[in-house]
Image: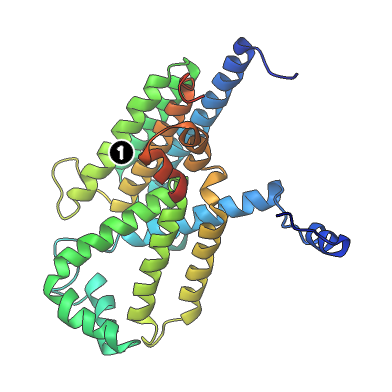
Amino acid sequence: MTTTETPATARERDVNQIETGRATRAVLAAVRIAVGLMWLQNVNWKRPPDFGQAAHNGLYQYTADAVKHPVLGAFSWLVQNVIYPNFALFGWAVLIAEFCLGAFLLVGFLTRFWAAIGILQTIAITLSVLNTPGEWQWSYYLMFAAQFVILATAAGRIAGVDGLLRPRWSLAEGRPARIAMVLS
Amino acid sequence: MSAATPTRSTARSSVAWRTRGLIVAGFTALGSLFSLLHYTPLQFVSVNLVQAVVLVAIGGLAALGCALRMPLLLLATGAISIIVGLVRLVTYDSTIGIISGSVNAAALMVGLGTALVAIWITSRPLSEKSQ
């Protein structure tokens, strides 16, 4: 079945076509790199072995805000009953996730996957600290916005590793290449 | 038809990977400059002296690989960079001799190492099977 397009619809589509020129592509790459640098800069203070549990600082302090200044009851319950008893494990998971977010968003490797992980991590951070006195809630809304832009535009294809490897993945046979195509 | 001859196409691809390699090598070496920066809002990566030396060495070797048309040097420097970064990640709770420094410099090394390995991959011709 073929769909017919009226001249008016076609004109509307043409007039509103999204800009994909060099400047747009440069901005998208810059957004991806900036978000990568944000994760890079903030991975440092997640320090093993106890991630601040003994001194009640660092990652422990921020996680505790989910209980002291709850945003969502279910998340506070999760922190108290699941995360606190396994805090070192949780700390290592956060450290590794943010390490990879910084490394791979910076160079644009499997960008859509890491942008999705970044969004999940931002949900966790937002549910921990949104009601903490002194926090600027727009920090977290902007983190969401930037990472949704990266996810939606697959920004690693511009000046990124994804852009280099996707032509090869697209020609390769086998599941790893197909998965890499989806995640990039 | 405007298809390039194999020789011309190979030459173009050689220029492409060497240019990309030089750019990443340059950024790797320039990463060491963060060790001189002590203004917190712009100190995206904390680099100590050992990590600065590693970044300069990796960047220099990768640039040499591009200049000498030796893509294997990109693979070697990329792999070393990834290993050095991962070693620091798993030893982040302690300082063991020269294994020290921040974990964000280690993440930078893993990212740039991944880029160098990717450029090495693109330096190789596509296999017949995949074309």
Q: Does A41 sit above or below residue B8?
A: below
Q: Chain of mark 1?
A: B
Where does the image place residue A97, in percent across and percent down from the top left?
31, 58
User: Which colour assignment does the render follow?
Assistant: rainbow
- Would you identify the image quadrant in which residue A16 lies? bottom right
Whole-percent x, y for residue A79 in the image:
22, 79
- Mark 1 element type: helix
Q: How many marks?
A: 1
Could you say which is closer to the camera, residue A102 or residue A166? A166
- Camera sees residue A184: no
Residue B87 visible, this angle? yes
Residue at left offset 42%, top offset 61%: A116
Image quarter hosting the N terminus of chain A = bottom right
Q: Quadrant of residue A56?
A: bottom left
- Find the residue positioned furthest to the right: A7
The local crowd at label 1, few if under 14, some if 14 to 19, many if 20 or more residues have their Cα within 10 Å, is: many
**Residue A35 picture location, percent across and down:** 48, 59
List the residue tagged with mark 1: B82
Q: Which of the two residues, A76 or A170, is positioned nearer the viewer here?
A: A170
Residue A128 or residue A119, whichever sits in front:
A119
Q: Taking A78 as reference, is A117 left or right?
A: right
Q: How far across and down, in percent of the image, does residue B9 sit?
A: 61, 17
Instruction: Residue at 55%, 42% (x, y): give it.
Output: A159
* Quarter of the figure with residue A52: bottom left
